[in-house]
Image: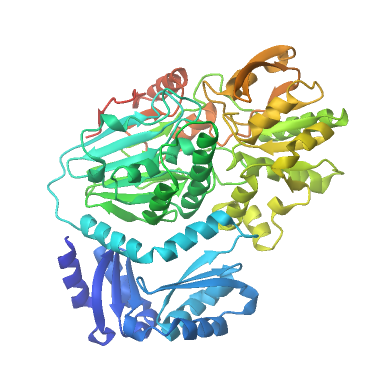
Amino acid sequence: MDFSSLEARINELMPSSAEITKIFPEGSEIIILTKNLEELIEDESIVRSIASELKKRVHVRGDPSIRKDPEKAKEIILDIVPKEAEIGDMFFVPESGKVYIEAKRLGLVIGKHGQNLKDIAIKTGWIPELWRSPNNPSPTLTGVRHTIVKHAKEIEKFLKKTGEKIYSDIGELQWVRITPLGGAREVGRSAFLLETNNSKILLDCGVNVASRERAYPMLDSINFPLDELDAVVISHAHLDHVGFVPYLYKYGFEGPTYCTPPTRDLSVLLMMDYIEVTAREGRDPPYGKDDIKEFVKHCIVKEYGEVTDITPDIRLTFHNAGHILGSAAVHLHIGQGFHNLLYTGDFKFGYTRLFDMIDTRYPRIETLIMESTYGGPQDIQPPRYTSERNLISTILETTSNGGSVLVPVFSIGRAQEIMLVLEEYARKNDWDIPVYIDGMIKEASLIHTAYPEYMKRSVQKRILHDDSPFDSDIFIEVDKNKRDQITEEGYSVILAPSGMLTGGPSVEYFKKMAENEKNAIVFVGYQSEGSLGRRVQSLGMNSKGKEIPVTIDGKTVALKINMRVETVEGFSGHADRNQLLSFFKKLTPRPQKVLVVHGEEKKALALTRSIEKARVEADAPRTLDSVRLR
């Protein structure tokens, strides 16, 4: 149904007393401006029945003529919401008719059965949009939120243009195909071009930070300009999935990027660090800060379970993937039942302290695209309690001899997982070992506190009760000028990015600590082919006295490794081989076709063969191998 038909039907269904002044698309959502906001808010059944009939998300907003002056509206809001909610900033955006309210306790802002939000809308004419305050000020969140407010006029114009495109007429759906532009039989630079005869969307668009030769997805292979791309859908915030998106905006893409709210914010944090690290290494970043800002301005965020049209013939729903904060399995409903696809991105189908496991129930799946990072026959992780015991044991043994333990971690995901393990042990035992957190870990953890609803209930509860485990006294944020002092003093744990020793503070610590046999390095996450982390990890227990070439002060030198080298399996945010197969077996409904991606070639092929034994068509495509799905 085109938009003019939708508009006509809404006018038929609306009571005349609603005083509708305008109906327009905002992305896939339909916005109704009214002079009688009270009637439509008090009687929710009116809008609900319209949304149900049209199968669209419908929202009502106050006509500009009924909106109170922002200063007066602010007074009303502060009178409605109890002080205990700890409201911080309020931003009034005339372009959208929204007031963004930043507060620490959103439940008190919402009120019982949402009554406070209703009262705010009715008494002020502004529709409240809520932002949770992090436990402490976060430069990333502040920057993202200010960008949204500052560029509201541009964003509103972009959303209307996107909506017009979504509700445009199209031809009959005839075929669906997918082409890996990266991330096939490799880990890194994930990018999958999904096409129908009407639409073109990109599932992820990442970089491979561990490779110079195959760093970027093969965008030069597509046979159309970037401005013909309809949308980008991002599964999660790790750079190998989102790190190349700003490049698209730099070179002509003007469409929407869909992701969850935490993914947007964490992506900005990692993108900013990526261009800074690249520049420090003497290389030209593929994009700049202005391009990251364009990414923010063109982001359309959606929660888990929220169904949204992203092109005239493709409907998107995000589901929890259990990998990192905001990570999503991407379900795409193509056409009116023409084809259904599930792209897992990176996922976990096992226990973690931070997140619930990936969802396994979906309405329909004909094609499954799943990762295979740990798809090899030997990729079996130990029980989690064993992993935690081994980590703690290594720390206690090393520090008892006066040494320090370096744990290279991804700033997002593994860092917080390890922090939870250490915080619980310290809380239950005598612990005087300082745990230094370096790089972006502190900032990433603050962003976690702004989205507790995306984590396990036990972690949510602590954050909402001002007892965030990430704020424990055992964690000490590092002043980068004191790294030498920390390594010389010993007797500490150091959590530092990057997790694969491909840059960042972890490399600096490694160079300072490697020759001291009292120290230890513990790998707790995946080490990509070609990374320094993989080369060090491969030394294992026989590392003592071995040499690794590293760059120090611009010169390549042989660094002697005397420190203990350990790998503690079981902390990964990826499913191991058993979990991958268990997920496939429990997936409902069972797909007809499986495409195995995001794994080194041997592992992807091994997982493919195992899936084929279940009498399901499976393939591990190569980069640029187009696969027709229907």
Residue closest to the eye, 210 or 257: 210
Q: Is residue 552 above or below residue 129?
A: above
The part of the image, by quadrant, that contains residue 414 is: top right
Residue under the image location 75 percent in, 40 percent down: 482
Q: Quadrant of the N terminus?
A: bottom left
Can residue 251 be spotted in the picture?
A: yes
List x then y, in percent, for residue 92. 44, 74
The tally of labels here is: 0
User: In this picture, is 442 found above or below 112?
Assistant: above
Picture coordinates of residue 191, whole percent (x, y) = 36, 35
Viewer-closest of 6 and 152: 152
Residue at 72% x, 41% y is 481
Q: Quick check: 112 left or right of 353?
A: left
Q: Decide if residue 401 is on the left or right side of residue 94.
A: right
Q: Quadrant of residue 487?
A: top right
Quarter of the figure with the C terminus: top left
